[in-house]
Amino acid sequence: MEMLIQLSFSLVGGLLMSRLAKVLNLPAVTAYLVTGLLLGPYCLGALHLAPLGFSTPDSLVRLDIISQVALGFIAFTIGNEFRLEQLRHMGKQAITVGILQAVATTALVDLALVGLHFIAPDLISISSAITLGAIAAATAPAATLMVVRQYKADGPLTKLLLLVVAIDDAVGLVLFSASFGVATALESGAISLVTVLLEPVIEIVLSLLLGTAAGLALFCVEECFHSRSKRLSIAIGFVLLTVGFSMVRFQVGSVHFGFSLLLVCMMTGTVFCNVCDFSEEIMSRVDGWTAPLFVLFFVLSGAELNLKILSNPMVLLIGAVYIVFRSLGKYLGSYGSCALTGCSESIKKHLGITLLPQAGVALGMALTAQRLADGEVVRSVVLFSVLVYELVGPALTKRSLVAAGEIREEGRTSARQRNVPKPPVRLDE
């Protein structure tokens, strides 16, 4: 009973808060996150007025499956952007930008935090510095997708953004695995090529293979049905199945095997949309079904944000350096790689800002990084950055898409219609 009431307050409270956000001209995702903060263990939850809030962080653990399922559907939806026609048009461009901006961000944050280590060795270790540099590459696809969907953004920047966000997960996984392997070697004095090189490559390959198999199987099963409701149910069932399989972990000898939830579900969506001629209709129906799920995902994400870290000056200092140089890395890396691939001036100016949101993937990496000697510092810094980026990032993404002309002013379009950029005003009219 208590769980159902908490979920009800989360869903209704988030939606009511989104009305206030609209008045303030903020994205709905910001309202959902703020609702989570208010219901979380550090606000209403601290009053222990169960079941009106989440009284302890442990009370949120049992709802983690909702976040995992929501991430699966988010990745499945983003995978729908990887249509062959789209890839022929900007696939090479997206891959180049996705890799270069991630590497540039990691390098810049590494330089800044390693420099901070030499200035104040007791503040942060080199192993933690290079681990944070790799985590900086990760971008949150959820907040980006929610802003795009809410305002029905459409145009070259939006299309490139969704492709880059998807590629970013694979690049971030490789960078983190390599950096964390080096960091572990610095502390233990022995480097493992299996951990640094083999395991991340295996994880990516296994994830792509599983996603491909799931996408093809989904198409074959969908072909057996003609009812729209049954096809929708099959699609939902397969996404749940891929989320479940992606949680499997096993070990053979000294090699650990696993899957990336985001990569598996993205690949499932990619394969399905390219082999199925009625995929667009199914995807539109899935989008409608997942709306309340995404609200719960962001409210629960907001409730998990730890406000206690704001009382630690050391975390605030390292976090400020991390945020500043990660933001510079995303912006300069995107600007440079876009210029290299011949993107328009509008995309060069705005893409980096839309890549600032950071959440689930980074938190997962930070959880792994806790095995370092001062891994708690890494986790606290990432928690602080997620708090800042999740509250500010969606608004900056919206602002950039508006400036690029890919979001119309609110109130000009029906919620049932796809948004399109305004036509340019002719000077001779």
Image (cartoon, rainbow, N blue to C red):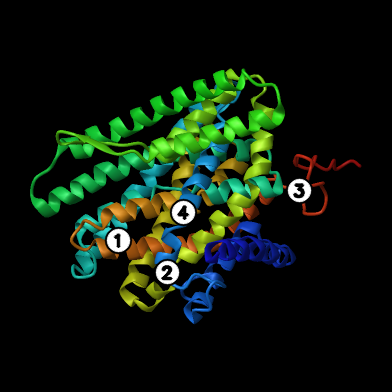
Q: Is residue 295 above or below residue 194?
A: below
Q: Please report contact status of discs 4 and 1: CB closer than 8 Å, yes or no.
A: no
Q: Which label's residue is closer to the chain start, 2 or 4? A: 2
Q: Which label's residue is closer to the chain start, 2 or 3? A: 2
The crowding category of the residue bearing disc 4, from other C-alpha atoms within 10 Å (few below 14, some 14 to 19, many at least 20), is many
Q: Real-space Cα distance between discs 2 and 4?
A: 15 Å
Q: Amino acid at mark 1?
A: Val
- Give the image quarter of residue 342: top right
Q: Which residue is under mark 2?
A: 306
Q: Please report contact status of discs 1 and 3: CB closer than 8 Å, yes or no.
A: no
Q: Which residue is under mark 1?
A: 378
- Residue 317 visible (yes or no): yes
Q: Which mark's residue is nearer the viewer, 4 or 3?
A: 4
Q: Real-space Cα distance between discs 4 and 1?
A: 15 Å
Q: Which residue is under mark 4?
A: 358
| Residue at 48% over, 43% down | 334
| Residue at 80% over, 39% down | 423
Q: Real-space Cα distance between discs 1 and 2?
A: 14 Å
Q: Nearer the viewer, residue 50 or 160?
A: 50
